[in-house]
Amino acid sequence: MELCPCLGDMPLSSIGNPPAKGLVGQMLAERRSHKTIKNVIRVAKMVVAFAINDEGDQIYLRNWNHEFIDLPDVSDQHTPTYSADEVQRIVPSAKGQSQMLYALLAGTGMRIGEVSGLEIDKPISHDASTIKTLQSVRSGAVQTPTARNGMTEIDITSELALAVREFIGERKSGL
């Protein structure tokens, strides 16, 4: 979905709630999914928000009104999750690297690519109480995040830190 057909050559200063409402209406008429509509509107809002002046201040401040825009709710999304009881059954039943993988995924909220990109000598603190997401693995290739927000520091429980230290053992490098 392109923003241009609906918003045309409209200057950024003119993009606000009424044009966004028109864009939502057009996408609803085209029977776009609610998730797609929400994502397209998010991109439009980000484009407006990223216009900054020489001092780094946002030029076009907006109070986006989702109700006025008729932005649809995104519901009934299939987001598979496990309960705490299920995790407590899954992790101990796994062995070796799989067990550590499942424990890190459940205990940190990291994505699979972020856990796969962990290197012993870089993101894990000496006591394993924090992990930094400095890189991830995607399609078999290690990559660094393109945005600073992609690099985060995660505090982990003392129990998980102990398990990580035991898993690392004497190794000084490697994924």
Image (spheres, rainbow, N blue to C red):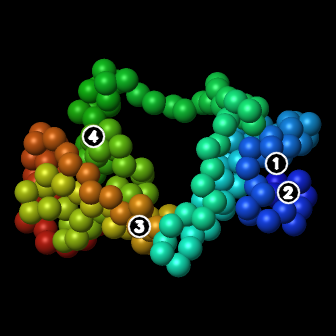
Q: Nearer the viewer, mark 2 or mark 4?
A: 2
Mark 2 or 3, nearer chain start: 2
Question: Disc 1 marks which residue?
Answer: 19
Q: Is residue 147 above or below residue 42?
A: below
Tell me which label, 1 or 4, sits earlier in the chain: 1
Q: Nearer the viewer, residue 38 or 18?
A: 18
Residues at circles 2 and 3 in contact by the CB criterion of under 8 Å:
no
Coordinates of residue 102 in the picture (x, y in percent): 32, 42
Q: Earlier in the sequence, mark 1 or mark 3?
A: 1
**Left or right of 26 in this view: 71:** left
Q: Is there CB contact under 8 Å for labels 2 and 1?
A: yes
Looking at the picture, how far across and down is residue 120, in whole percent? 21, 66
Q: CA distance from mark 1 to mark 4?
A: 43 Å
Q: Quadrant of the N terminus?
A: bottom right
Q: Are marks 1 and 4 in contact (CB under 8 Å)?
A: no
The residue that mark 3 highlights is 148
* Marks 2/1: CA–CA distance: 7 Å
Spatial CA distance of label 2 from label 3 is: 30 Å
Q: Which quadrant of the figure has residue 10?
A: bottom right
Q: Residues within 10 Å of mark 3 (few under 14, many from 20)?
A: few
